[in-house]
Image (cartoon, rainbow, N blue to C red):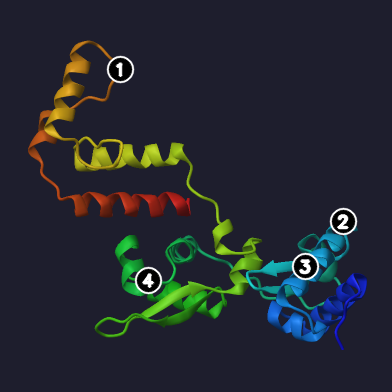
Amino acid sequence: MRVDDLREQELVVEAVLFTMGQSVEIRQLAAALETTEKEAAAAAERLRERYDEEERGMQILRLEDSYQMSTRAKFYSNLIKVAATPKKQVLSDVVMETLAIIAYKQPVTKADIEKIRGVKSDHAVNRLIEYNLVYEAGRMDAPGRPALFATTEEFLRRFGVSSTVELPEMNMEQREEIKSEVEEELNLKLNGDGLPMSDEELAALAEAEAENIDSDIVTEDSKKINYTEEEINTKINEEDERHEMQ
């Protein structure tokens, strides 16, 4: 029977989430309420806000198109006094680095991960799958049909975000630092778009330096080295990834 009373909708959602003990899709909540998915999501949001306002020991989590009831993390130390201590999953720097690449580039192949990291990543990817933080999301339509990897709901729970769009973005200060590092490594000057400066731009910069305007130094060697646009963009993307993981 359709549930129209708003308070009762919350109670039904609460009962379903408690009983299931895992994430429940909005469409399933709608089936339980015999309402639209929009109404079901609204009921779940009201319940989530109520739990937060009352600071209950349990919380309602939004995980993309699903909701789940879980214990608040701050009560972990109390729980382990009466429950078996769960095995702690320690993520090494290598595993965290691999996870960050997958999180920001998903879906991504193992070959792309290794291209960014510069080393083999089989062990790190397998460990993330074992921890249920990453899963095989499909296969790329390319020779060999390489597997595509993406993050799981467990990843969202562990890192406290509702969806991957909430992952932090790199700030402009980091971007400028990356640009400087790329310029130094490749020994050339980049413009505001991250591309090698044209002859006209280099000439203007040299003229500015002659007038003692605060500018970066242009070396003669930088004019002699020729890199393709693809090589430059690849290098910048690799530096972006490294800073995102930091």
Q: Are marks 4 and 1 in contact (CB under 8 Å)?
A: no
Q: Element type at marker 3?
A: helix
Q: Which residue corresponds to mark 2? A: 53
Amino acid identity at mark 1 = Asp
Q: Are marks 4 and 2 in contact (CB under 8 Å)?
A: no
N-term mark: 3 or 1: 3
Q: Element type at marker 2?
A: helix
Where on the picture, by quarter, is residue 108? Answer: bottom left
Q: Which residue corresponds to mark 4? A: 121
CA gap between label 4 and label 2 equals 43 Å
Q: Which residue corresponds to mark 1? A: 214
Q: Quadrant of the N terminus?
A: bottom right
Residue 238 image offset from top left, x and y in percent? 33, 54
Residue 120 image offset from top left, x and y in percent? 33, 70
CA gap between label 1 and label 2 equals 53 Å
Question: Of tags 3 and 2, which is closer to the observer?
Answer: 3
Amino acid identity at mark 2 = Glu
Question: Of tags 3 and 1, which is closer to the observer?
Answer: 3
Amino acid identity at mark 4 = Ser
In front: 91, or 192?
192
Q: Which residue corresponds to mark 3? A: 42
CA gap between label 4 and label 3 equals 42 Å
Question: Of tags 4 and 2, which is closer to the observer?
Answer: 2
CA gap between label 3 and label 2 equals 16 Å
Residue 189 image offset from top left, x and y in percent? 22, 35
N-term mark: 4 or 3: 3
CA gap between label 3 and label 1 equals 56 Å
Residue 103 in view in this figure: yes
